[in-house]
Image: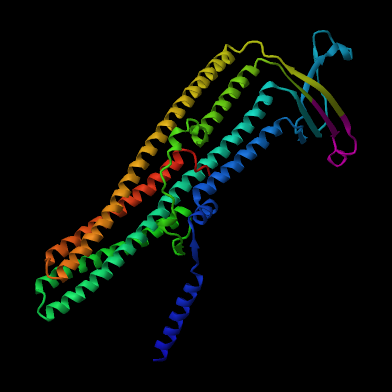
Amino acid sequence: MLLAAILSLISSSVLLAQTDTVTTHSFTLEECIQYAYKHQTDVLNADIDQKIADAKVKETIGIGLPQISGNARFQDFLKIPTSLIPSEIFGGAPGTFTPVQFGVKYQSTTGIDVSQLLFDGSYIVGLQASKTFKELSQRAFTRTKIETNVSVRKAYYMVLVNNEQLDLLNANISQLGEQLKQTKALNENGFAEKIDVDRLNVLYNNLVTERENIKRLLALGNQMLKFQIGMPVEHTLIVEGKIADVNLADNEEVVLDTTAYKSRIEYSLTQTQIKLNELDLKRYKSQYLPSLAAFGSGAYQFQSNNFNQLYDNRFPTVVVGLQLNVPIFSGFQKANRVAQAKLELQKSNNNLFQVKNSINLDIKNSATSFRNSIASLNNQRANLNLANEILRVSKIKYEQGVGSSIEVTQAQTSLKEAENNYINALYDALVNKVNLDKASGKINE
């Protein structure tokens, strides 16, 4: 018994600790999106890519800054090099040579080298290209945020729709349960047949089963939303808001806006790519220009036959100068690079036209799909209201003895079907709204 009590206490403590570590969030749609911007993996990686591009720009700038390096060298000539000089210098016979050794056993050198690029056309163009590359990474970051925004909206709306369907089922189950209760009472008093009760029981059980399925789908949708925003799945997420808060008004002006393509990040990305290709062409052309650099170096040389006295005497050397490189002929390589860059630029301009055309088509398709879904939603909402009215009338007729239980069960079945159709139309309308907002550039981050 003591062991059982200890285990129970430990289990309770562990359970309490686990409960304390569970974090609960209550988010609106906008809060879900902002959370995703700070935690979603794709967004975080895109932000890192921005920082990499920024470091790349600074790396390119560094090429034009002074380049300084130090060097040190130590040599121990185990065998000092021997040279042959004419013996005549020492009074020897002409045509003969005398071996002599120049230098000392130990030598050491320390120095510093400095260079500064003064002019290089490729470097100047490279600076411009690096900044444009940084701009490209920023636009890619924006595109990632837009894609994340769209995914979060769709997952969020799925949760709202499941909540709406659950509310409809709860209301349906409540009124059907009341009707079932009344029918049982009528049957017990001999005013209704047992088959009437059985029919309603079947409908009631089906609705309860469907409600449990929707609850599981709701839990799954909630998990999907947490995944889309980068939230740990063990956290608790409570979705605030209702379907009624979403504006599903049909917006005609979107189709009439012929400049909406300019708001799309895909168009901006293609424009930036064209700028990069233009700079690439400029860079290859700049390779025909000469380059000029300044350099300088200073060193101390130490020599001695005795290692202990190696650094007693030093001999300084200093040199400064200019280096000019003038390209003359490179086997037509530069000309062919320029030709390739021109063709790449032409392809980019063709792509820009294609992107513009594609975006305009996307806008029109999205607008048409949205209008169709709104029309379908309005129709299914009307059908739902009509199904409710038919059920109400059928119940009154049955209670007054001028209708049959079959009419009531058929009306109840029709109501369930109308609710399902309404929910499907509602989700389609919400998704198509997101697609339209994205297509028209309204979702821009």
Colour scheme of this structure image? rainbow
Is residue 328 left or right of 237 when viewed as pictured? right
Location of residue 387 (image quadrant): bottom left
Evaluate whether residue 108 shows in this view.
no
Location of residue 182 (image quadrant): bottom left
Judging depth in this view, the residue of 12 and 20 nearest the camera is 20
Looking at the rendered image, the quarter that the N terminus falls into is bottom left
Judging depth in this view, the residue of 48 and 231 nearest the camera is 231
Location of residue 363 (image quadrant): top left
Residue range (magenta): 295-316
**Residue, x 49% and y 55% (percent of image)?**
32
**Is 47 drawn above or below residue 83 in the view shown?**
below
Residue 163 screen position, x and y as percent: 37, 61
Residue 119 screen position, x and y as percent: 74, 22
**Is 362 drawn above or below residue 96 in the view shown?**
below
**Residue, x 47% and y 77% (percent of image)?**
16
Residue 305 part of the magenta segment? yes
Evaluate whether residue 345 shows in this view.
yes
Residue 307 part of the magenta segment? yes
Residue 306 screen position, x and y as percent: 85, 38
Residue 56 screen position, x and y as percent: 63, 37
**Is 102 drawn above or below residue 243 in the view shown?**
above
